[in-house]
Amino acid sequence: MRCLKVPFRETLKPFQPLKGYFIQNRVALTMGLLSLLLVDFLQLLIPLIIKRAIDLLTVQSAVEIKTLLLKQALTIVGLALIIALFRYIWRHLLLGHSRKVEQKLRNRLYQHLQTLSLSFFQRTRTGDLMARAINDINAVRMASGMGLVALVDGAVLGMAAIGFMVSINLKLTLISLIPAPVVVILTRKLTRRMSGGFEAVQKKFADLTEQIREIFAGIRVIKAYGGQGWEYENVETQSEGYVAENMTLARTLAVFFPVMTLFTNTGLAIVILLGGRYAILGSITPGDFVAFISYLNLLTWPMMAMGWVTNLFQRGSAAMRRINRILAEAPEIQDPQPPEALSRDVKGEMPPLREASIAVRGLSFRYPDQESYALKDICFTISSGKTVALVGGVGSGKSTLLRTLPRILDVPLHTVWVGGQDIRKVPLRWLRQQMGVVTQEVFLFSDTIRNNVVFGREGISEASLQQALYVADVLQEVQALEKGMDTMLGERGVSLSGGQRQRLTIARALVADPPVLILDDALSMVDTRTEARILGRILGLPGERTTWIVSHRVATIRRADWILVLHEGRLVEGGEHHKLIRAGGQYAALYEKQLLEEESQTEA
């Protein structure tokens, strides 16, 4: 793998979105950095105390030395206690700051992801998003916490240590720093390679995460077909790729840190060789010699910190670039600017639709990267309170049409009206609050039955909840459970049958009493009698509710007030059941076909 080379000066640019978080935490950051600097200053005083103690050994009597050394020892203990206190303060404040950055960035990423359109999630793997929300954000946290600490601490302590070394002997300092230019050159070369290496590792981690996520999600299929060995090989291949990328990066890191160690040890060897001679000749005192070595040892941490800082910032920068790509994604479907003025109640909330008529005029829609239209020149008007059945073969555009009503799929301006409002001119949140949607995909969360049905909506009474479960014909089954509506469901509601899961999603759509109800093949997992019972209860609910139904059962279709027939994205027929049968067109043919299929299934 050939690593992309990124100049170190470019490393900090991806962190620009974090600027606001640093400003918000500026008080804690300032106090933490001041505590860190105070710790560094006190650490620099300890070699001076040791220098004084050693010099006293050469000039004072035994009695005086004992008293003076005790004084120096107590001073060091006092400094150690103060250092411990302020080290606790800076760790609490600065590392706490990094946790706050982590929290705010994760919340921002999740909030932004919720605004993105379905097309983004269709082209982006779930495992990749999980890797960015967990592994990448953790790398950013390390860079904004320990990376910041090591950068400031290393820079201040390093420069101050060099300053004290110069004050002892300038010539010895310059000689001990001879290896520094070599270290700088090697650092520039290696850090450019590390940046690209970190990003390649993160990408491979995302691939591995997605592979394992798919296996856990499809474990029942794997077991049913005995495909454990095949899937094991797939994971093994992904793991080998991840390890290979990490080993490529490790080879770079394996060179980096030894270079830092070599520098400090080489400098120490020079000091012992020349500094000892200076002490013997009287150019510096023995105390100066020991203090110089102490400062050179203090310089070891800044040199190591240089490598650690580079490691943390390169890793964090690579992670932040991946996060920024998500944050740069703009939702294809957005609120109008400005939204159409709608009357509001005394609380400032927009009221629900007074009437739920649906009008479509010249609607055409084509999915990205598709040449043919999923919908072509669709026109119709449905009065409020009607029940509409959508009929057509597979791929005729039924689900696509229903997804345009709540703007899950976007439509051109002046093509779809709900309750007399152009859906492109009203706020998305308000529009979707007017609709209860049950899709073909049955999805429940790992939460209680109550929370799955209420779904975070406020103002839902216990009576409304029970009424929704009753209409969906699942109330008795829920009450029979040990904890009733507070029963926890497994992942995706796996502890329930398919029919129970589907009926709970119907209750979820009904509980807020929406003016528009969309049932996209929402009764396919229940038997005919249960479907008839549920549909009868739905149609018997009070209020002017417009209900849309997609079904392949004859009895359900016949109960609709109006039937729309789609074929290859075009509306070919529309009208009442008996009139469409008499017309003998495409609906009549589809109806006869479905009738024969139901009769054959009954006989079987």
Image (tube, rainbow, N blue to C red):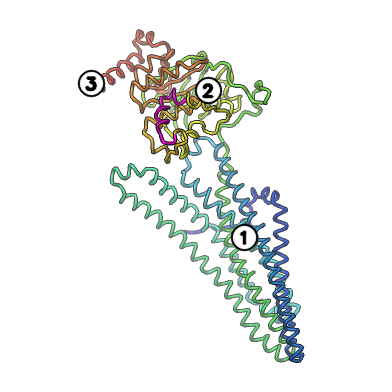
Name the foreground residue: 323 vs 187.
Answer: 323
Q: Mark 3 and mark 1 in contact (Cβ < 8 Å)?
A: no
Position of residue 318 measured from the top left corner of the image (x, y, whole percent)? 56, 54
Q: Which mark is residue 603?
A: 3
Position of residue 353 measured from the top left corner of the image (x, y, whole percent)? 58, 19
Above or below, comparing residue 306 to residue 264 in the picture: above
Q: Mark 1 and mark 2 in contact (Cβ < 8 Å)?
A: no
Position of residue 207 measured from the top left corner of the image (x, y, whole percent)? 44, 50
Q: CA distance from mark 1 to mark 3?
A: 73 Å
* Residue beneath disc 1: 147
Q: Quadrant of the C terminus?
A: top left
Q: Earlier in the sequence, mark 1 or mark 3?
A: 1
Decide whether residue 454 is among the magenta residues. no
Q: Is residue 531 visible?
A: yes
* Residue beneath disc 2: 514
Name the foreground residue: 450 vs 256.
Answer: 450
Q: Amino acid at mark 3?
A: Glu
Q: Amino acid at mark 2?
A: Pro
Q: State left or right for residue 244 relative to residue 295.
A: left
Q: State left or right for residue 377 relative to residue 585.
A: right
Name the foreground residue: 336 vs 597.
Answer: 597
Magenta stretch? 468-483
Q: Amino acid at mark 1?
A: Gly
Q: CA distance from mark 3 to mark 2?
A: 39 Å
Q: CA distance from mark 2 to mark 1?
A: 51 Å
Q: Earlier in the sequence, mark 2 or mark 1?
A: 1
Q: SS for tag 2?
A: loop
Position of residue 418 measured from the top left corner of the image (x, y, whole percent)? 55, 19
Q: Residue 29's quadrant in the figure?
A: bottom right
